[in-house]
Image: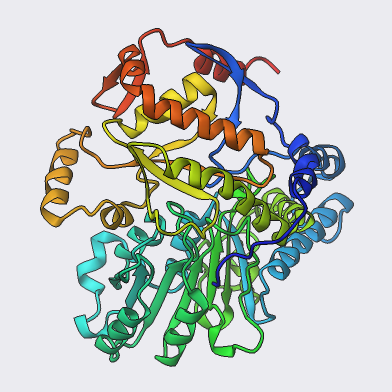
């Protein structure tokens, strides 16, 4: 992945371009109530999840909704229509990621976590822990999986629970993926029969990209495979599974979470992979839609088409249709516009946060990134920081380790001894020393005024958090902070969601 481009648009042009998309985003004018009064919601948690988009909701309910019926038929009008719409949605998703005719798509679960685990089962790399010792291959025959130091837990811990050995590619002196270190690991494990790189495209903590096509070329030269997790970056960049002119740089599998797109909440995870990796007679989820025939004597035959065979039961056809619409929306906004607008917002936020006394940006020497900024403030617990930004300013951010604990060790320079001390305490239910940060994510639909407001709020937080903290109590069991006069806005609003229809 090359550095993000800086587009040269007239001042205000990109903000104006995204204004209609902002207006149609559900919640863009929503207010909330905190112990300090009522205020607008300022959503800055886009890397965690996108938001609903009014035209998509209208399309789903008013246009598609009246025809909803089960798929798996080509006879009734409603069933046929949903079947056709489902398959058209899958084709649109595959086209968007540059899949080839040899690639299959599976939509499953609620995000990338579900599909990467399903993929591991399809590859025959997952065995129930009760049987692991009985079927585990000899040490020199175990598949080897390489992950980067920046992985989300879903693309690291899931592989740790397979039949594979897992090696972390260490960072270089600049905190980026060290390709020379990968070369050394490939040489070390040259005799392993299966070699896989399963790597993130972009860190959900710092927004730094990995050179995934370069890694794919190295893996293929060594007889290996390259899988890429696009969960963080898919809403913002072009995904090219098979880059023109670089046949060895193609990706053998990708996975992502469409719920992170604008318009995407409520979708399934997406897996696209090369069908030559599929050698199974039995599908992962045998059931309706996966068989050609059965008989009373225990005989049966599964369908030959891989996408149908791995789509047992009633598929998530509405989820796939919603995914295709969210992708269509992304294409309407334009990837070049998205990245350029993110850079405009970064140009507002980055230097201002860098100048705040006592505030430390993670990977602070890498301003060229996706619009993700993680930071901590001296003597301020990250979850209290998040609570204060919420209660005093309505700003929605996220605290913790962003499900990237391994990366956190590198970013915060946590030694083995320090890590052992922390994890021993966590195992004993003592969470107060658990490291973390505040993660802020920008989005092209944000306004310049919002970006400046966020900067102002964080500057005030850094200056006044000690005094403001007096209003809060710490819950050790949950590692959370609560205002002494917590209003019931959240509980009462949640209860209202389930009022009589």
Of residues 240 and 438, the one nearer the viewer is 438
Of residues 151 and 64, the one nearer the viewer is 151
Give residue 422's position: percent from left, percent from top.
Answer: 16, 43
Q: What residue is shown at x 63% (from left), y 65% (from top)?
A: 5
Of residues 253 and 479, the one nearer the viewer is 479
Which of the 4 quarters of the picture holds residue 467? top left
Give residue 496's position: percent from left, percent from top.
Answer: 61, 16
Residue 482 at least partly seen:
yes
Residue 297 at least partly seen:
no
Q: What residue is shown at x 47% (from left), y 77% (from top)?
A: 226
Q: What residue is shown at x 79% (from left), y 55% (from top)?
A: 332
Give residue 319's position: percent from left, percent from top.
Answer: 67, 49
Above or below, 341 against 53 in this view is: below
Which of the 4 quarters of the picture holds residue 248? bottom right
Of residues 201 and 65, the one nearer the viewer is 201
Above or below, 64 against 248 in this view is: above
Give residue 279's position: percent from left, percent from top.
Answer: 50, 81
Above or below, 418 against 94 in this view is: above
């Amino acid at each position: 992945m090359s550095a993000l481009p800086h587009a040269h648009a007239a001042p205000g042009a990109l903000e104006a371009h995204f204004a209609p998309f902002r207006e149609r985003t559900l919640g863009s004018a929503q207010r909330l109530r905190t112990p300090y009064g009522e205020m607008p919601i300022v959503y800055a948690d886009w890397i965690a999840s996108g938001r609903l988009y009014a035209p998509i909701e209208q399309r789903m309910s008013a246009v598609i909704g009246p025809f909803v019926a089960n798929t798996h038929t080509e006879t009734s009008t409603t069933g046929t229509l949903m079947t056709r719409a489902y398959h058209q949605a899958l084709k649109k998703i595959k086209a968007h990621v540059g899949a080839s005719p040899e690639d299959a798509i599976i939509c499953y679960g609620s995000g990338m976590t579900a599909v990467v685990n399903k993929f591991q089962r399809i590859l025959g790399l997952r065995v129930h822990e009760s049987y692991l010792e009985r079927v585990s291959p000899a040490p020199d025959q175990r598949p080897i999986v390489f992950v980067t130091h920046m992985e989300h837990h879903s693309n690291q811990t899931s592989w740790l629970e397979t039949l594979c050995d897992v090696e972390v590619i260490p960072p270089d002196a600049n905190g980026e993926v060290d390709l020379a270190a990968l070369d050394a690991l490939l040489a070390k494990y040259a005799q392993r029969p299966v070699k896989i790189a399963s790597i993130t495209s972009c860190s959900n903590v710092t927004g730094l990209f990995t050179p995934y096509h370069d890694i794919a070329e190295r893996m293929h030269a060594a007889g290996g495979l390259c899988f890429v997790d696009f969960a963080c970056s898919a809403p913002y960049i072009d995904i090219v599974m098979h880059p023109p002119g670089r046949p060895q740089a193609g990706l053998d599998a990708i996975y992502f979470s469409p719920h992170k797109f604008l318009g995407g909440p409520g979708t399934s995870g997406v897996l696209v992979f090369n069908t030559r990796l599929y050698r199974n007679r039995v599908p992962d989820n045998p059931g309706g839609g996966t068989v050609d025939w059965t008989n009373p004597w225990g005989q049966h035959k599964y369908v030959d088409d891989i996408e149908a065979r791995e789509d047992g039961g009633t598929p998530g056809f509405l989820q796939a249709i919603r995914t295709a619409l969210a992708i269509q929306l992304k294409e309407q906004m334009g990837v070049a516009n998205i990245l350029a607008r993110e850079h405009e917002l970064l140009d507002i936020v980055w230097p201002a946060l860098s100048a705040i006394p006592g505030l430390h940006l993670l990977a602070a020497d890498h301003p060229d990134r996706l619009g993700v900024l993680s930071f901590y403030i001296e003597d301020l617990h990250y979850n209290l920081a998040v609570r204060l930004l919420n209660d005093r300013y309505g700003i929605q951010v996220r605290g913790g380790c962003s499900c990237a604990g391994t990366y956190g060790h590198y970013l915060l320079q946590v030694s083995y001894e320090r890590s052992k001390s922390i994890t021993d305490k966590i195992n004993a239910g003592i969470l107060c020393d658990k490291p973390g940060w505040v993660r802020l994510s920008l989005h092209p639909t944000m306004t310049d005024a919002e970006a400046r407001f966020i900067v102002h709020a964080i500057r005030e937080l850094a200056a006044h958090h000690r005094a403001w903290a007096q209003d809060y109590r710490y819950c050790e069991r949950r590692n959370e902070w609560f205002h002494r006069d917590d209003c019931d806005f959240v509980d009462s609003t949640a209860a209202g969601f389930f009022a009589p229809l």
